[in-house]
Image (cartoon, rainbow, N blue to C red):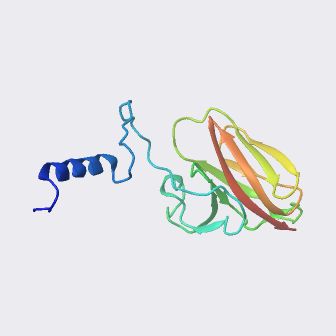
Amino acid sequence: MRIPGRSRTGVLALAGVLAATGCTGGPATRSAQPPQPSQPPRPAQAAPASCDGAVQRGALPTWARSGFTPADVPTDHVVGARGDIVGVVFGNPLHAPATAQGRSNKILWVARPEGPRNTDLTIEARLQGTGDAVTRTVRGGPGPSVVDVPRPGCWTFRLSWDGHVDEVAVPYQAS
């Protein structure tokens, strides 16, 4: 192709510069370190800001289905903002205070399988918009728990275990 007023060398040089900069106008940069092996990507999820839609009814994430038959049965659950933990909510909706006869605020915590569980699961729960806070411990790490809170509302649970931290929003309605 012939471009009037331009030399072929100049056009090729310009094309090379644009390719190297990605057409961004800035210089191309490269990492000085070799690429590191990556873990499987986590689902992109926002931090739990509200309880609207926090409890989902559907199949659990594939990695959290062990022990559920059939594996894709619709189940009430909450998913951590990082996608590292799922809380299977039994007796949905949860109630506060937990005074109803025969009801339990049971949540089964299932952590993404990444090795042995060596520490307890600590739940630091805060009622959004207040200073109310409670702490609960699940001995031995993620597993079955009863998480009773003193007042209804939207509670943010900060969950920590074995060097992992995740958060979920959990709604409680008045008893």
Q: In the rendering, at what x and y percent does residue 50 appear?
A: 72, 63
98 w.r.t. 85: above or below: below
User: In the picture, which quadrant includes the C terminus?
Assistant: bottom right
Q: Horizontal placement of 26 versus 135: left or right?
A: left
The answer to whether 163 appears left or right of 10 in the picture is: right
Task: Name the residue at 81% across, 44% down.
Answer: 135
In the foreground, 31 or 139: 31
**Taking 125 as reference, is 152 above or below it?**
below
> Can the viewer see residue 104 in this picture?
no
Work out which residue is located at the far left of the displayed protein and give it.
Answer: 1
Residue 103's place in the image compared with 136, above or below, is: below
Viewer-proximal residue among 75 and 151: 151
Q: Position of residue 78 (x, y in %)?
A: 64, 60
Taking the spot 68% from the left edge, 58% from the top edge, the residue there is 48
Q: Is residue 59 left or right of residue 39?
A: right
Q: Who is closer to the viewer here, 29 or 78?
A: 29
Residue drawn at x 61%, y 57% is 46
Spot occupied by residue 37 in the image (x, y as percentages of width and height): 39, 37
What residue occupies the far top of the structure in this picture? 33
Residue 67: percent from left, percent from top = 54, 54
**The N terminus - image quarter:** bottom left
Does the image show residue 57?
A: yes
116 vs 48, left or right, is left
